[in-house]
Image (cartoon, rainbow, N blue to C red):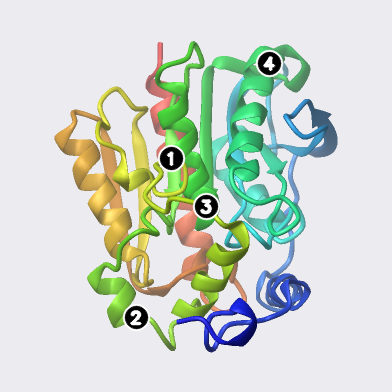
Amino acid sequence: MLAAGGVSEGAYANVVQRRQALDDLTGWAGGDSPAVGGVRDAEVAGPGGPIGVRIYSPLGAPPGSLGAMVFFHGGGWVAGSLETHDGVCRRLANASGCRVIAVDYRLAPEHPFPAAVEDAYAAVRAVADRAGDFGVDAARLGVAGDSAGAGLTAAVCQLARGDSLQIAFQLLICPILDVAAESASRLELAEGYFLNRATLERDLELYAPPDRADPRVSPLRAGDLGGLPPAFIHTAEFDPFRDEGRAYARRLAEAGVAVADVCHEGMIHYFYAMPRMTGLAEAALARMGAEVATHLGAIP
């Protein structure tokens, strides 16, 4: 429901406050940043100008090319940054043995739909085309993200299917995959479980996809999921988006795509980024990284 001024009832009115709240949460609950083998910033070309990226090398990385994970942060298409997900990317780099390349894609409302998904796709294409510059093996290039960034991950895989862009895996963490419908978990967990319904609605108003069933914002709505990369999908028991993540896993499996589907009991949305609040955050990221490492090790 919209209140006066076009803002969803009960939602935030100021996007600056939305962004600051995520920044503050990360600072409070994110824990210490683990050491990695190296971090450097760079840029790739994008449809709206240069896109910032941050490259994390894992501890003990051997010389030469490594598998790579292009990572898209969450934040409802309006918040989040390289900084809010620095700890997540560091932990995933060490656990997977991959170079993790985090993407600073454009945010709404300054850059509404489809800016985020266009930047996400452009970044993956740029890393594949310039693999040597990033020290990565283009044959072992995967994509990953959390929350809205996981939705971007799924959308990129779908867009790449008809292109020459080869993606080795997709890692979806507490993904938002269908904003055109209300799942049982979205209704049941609409309030009191970290990310509430009003916040998501306001995020969507600012991102403003003209059709919420467009697979670029609701990948679960795609008609055909065949031929997509192997998927690692991690959901949380008390996450409003739990059901759409699990539904996507089922549909991928039905389409013949290899899927590992894990629901973390007792956890809420964004738990994996809050190691000061739960020891299961570190364990979950370690598990995700190990899954990716095992998969990449199996690729000839």
The amino acid on which the numbered mark 4 sits, given as a three-letter code, is Ala
The amino acid on which the numbered mark 1 sits, given as a three-letter code, is Ala
Q: CA distance from mark 2 to mark 1?
A: 23 Å
Q: Position of residue 294 (x, y in %)?
A: 40, 32
Q: CA distance from mark 3 to mark 4?
A: 32 Å
Q: Position of residue 215 (x, y in %)?
A: 39, 42
Of tags 4 and 2, the one toward the viewer is 2
| Picture disc at residue 189 | 2
Q: CA distance from mark 3 to mark 2?
A: 24 Å
Q: Residue at x 46, y 41 (%)?
A: 216
State which quadrant residue 102 falls in.
Answer: top right
Secondary structure under the numbered disc 2 in the rendered image: loop
Which residue was labeled with disc 4? 131
Q: CA distance from mark 1 to mark 3?
A: 17 Å
Q: Residue at x 44, y 88 (%)?
A: 192
Q: Residue at x 28, y 81 (%)?
A: 188
Instruction: Please tell me which residue lies in front, 207 or 257.
Output: 207
Outermost residue, left side: 254
Secondary structure under the numbered disc 3 in the rendered image: loop
**Is 175 above or below relative to 249?**
below
Q: Residue at x 75, y 50 (%)?
A: 35
Instruction: Please tell me which residue lies in front, 165 or 276.
Output: 165
Q: Position of residue 299 (x, y in %)?
A: 40, 17
Instruction: Please tell me which residue lies in front, 268 or 11.
Output: 11
Q: Earlier in the sequence, mark 1 or mark 3?
A: 1
Which residue was labeled with disc 1? 154
Q: Earlier in the sequence, mark 4 or mark 2?
A: 4
Q: Earlier in the sequence, mark 2 or mark 1?
A: 1
